[in-house]
Amino acid sequence: MKRTLKSIGILSLVAMLATGGAFGQQLPQFSQYIFNGLHVNPGYAGYKGEPYLQSTYRSQWIDFPGAPETFTVTADLSANEGTMGFGFSLLSDQLGPARTTTGLLTYAYRIQTGRKSFLGLGASVGVSEYMIDGALFDPNDQGDVLIPEGRVNMFTPNLNTGLFFHNDKFYAGFSVYNMIGKNSLEQEDIALAYHDFHYYLTAGAMLNLSDNVGFKPSFLIRQVKGAPTNYDINGMFLFFERLWVGASYRSNMKLWTEVDQDLTSRNAVAAIIEVFATDRLRLGYAYDQSLNVLQDYRHNSHELSVGFYMIPRTAKMKNQRWF
């Protein structure tokens, strides 16, 4: 069993290097996380103050063999006049012959630190399944004992924690993902960098340019062992409190970790739009253009999101400034 699981790590790494480039060792990335903080911080749960459901589908590097496809469903709820937040997340990430499925339950407690400022302390607990399908491989040498026959999977616990601060002009958050579960993988003679500690630091502000136009600059920094420090710089315009239009620049740099210089080059830009189609329905789309070695192959990425408020509301949101 351990030998088979070891092959999972080897073959998954090969698939990641073939398709993931600089980000093969990191958790799935999204361009529209700026509208759903549960993707990067458990402390965000309950921030909207409204029961909210969202689903996101991302197809990365279209037509590239083994390219990642990611699907998520999240629920964001609040209770006790907004002092408590609850969340649920389900993620499925397909990368070549490997698939990761994670289910999480989230709780956040919100502390009022000022007249208009709050600090959310959150945690997510759940389980992750790692699966590889040996039938999807086409080896040069048939009968290789290191290639599993059929599907092989294993489960590991998961824990994420986060802090999320906000007032009416500014927000900032810090979170740590994959805090447990690595030891259970190593006991089975498999080491997945995908399940290493992931650190997220984010912040942004809302600037009112006029009565009907706002501008939100923001950034996100990701760090994981063995990979370059990844960062996003975002700029979003809000028109009439109904339409978000903007862009994101994603790249990486050698900050704390020694990595190959080729991995610290620019990566991608994304055009992002989100609209309140009705008082309860939000629709979003992001188009990513690679700026690395894939830019000449037209292997771009598409991301769709649908959000739904479960109670009637007006388009003017209580906490729409940030996400």
Image: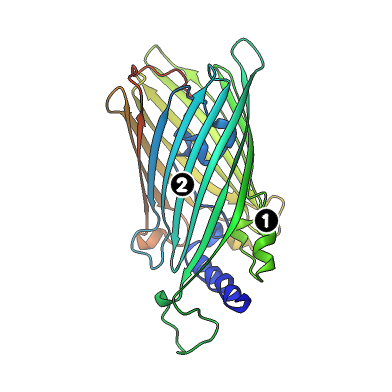
Q: Can residue 7 be seen in this snapshot? A: yes
Judge whether 252 appears above or below 175 on screen: below
- Determine whether, in the image, residue 229 is placed left or right of residue 250: right
Marks 1 and 2, Cα distance to the nearest angstrom? 24 Å
Mark 2, other Cα within 10 Å: few <14 / some 14–19 / many ≥20: some
- Determine whether, in the image, residue 304 is placed left or right of residue 111: left
* Circle 1 or circle 2, nearest the eye: 2
Kindly indicate whether the residue at mark 2 contacts the one at mark 1 (C-beta within 8 angstroms).
no
**Along the viewing direction, whichever of 198 and 87 lies nearer the viewer:** 87
Mark 1, other Cα within 10 Å: few <14 / some 14–19 / many ≥20: some
Please give the name of the residue rendered at 43% of the width and 20% of the height, measured from the top-left corner. Answer: 214
**Along the viewing direction, whichever of 235 and 296 lies nearer the viewer:** 235
- Tag shown at residue 165: none
Say which label, 1 or 2, has the lower sequence index: 2
Query: Disc 1 on helix, strand or loop?
Result: loop
**Along the viewing direction, whichever of 240 and 10 lies nearer the viewer:** 10
**Along the viewing direction, whichever of 188 and 237 lies nearer the viewer:** 188
Please give the name of the residue rendered at 38% of the width and 65% of the height, measured from the top-left corner. Answer: 64
The amino acid beneath tag 1 is: Lys
Query: Disc 2 on helix, strand or loop?
Result: strand
Image coordinates for residue 62, horizontal then vertical, percent: 35, 59
Q: Mark 1 points at which residue?
A: 225
Image coordinates for residue 290, horizontal then vertical, percent: 43, 54
The amino acid beneath tag 2 is: Leu
Q: Which quadrant of the figure contains the N terminus?
A: bottom right
- Determine whether, in the image, residue 267 is placed left or right of residue 138: right
Please give the name of the residue rendered at 46% of the width and 40% of the height, measured from the top-left corner. Answer: 248
Q: Can residue 259 be seen in this snapshot? A: no
Q: Mark 2 points at which residue?
A: 90
Image coordinates for residue 268, horizontal then vertical, percent: 46, 50
Please give the name of the residue rendered at 59% of the width and 13% of the height, measured from the top-left corner. Answer: 116
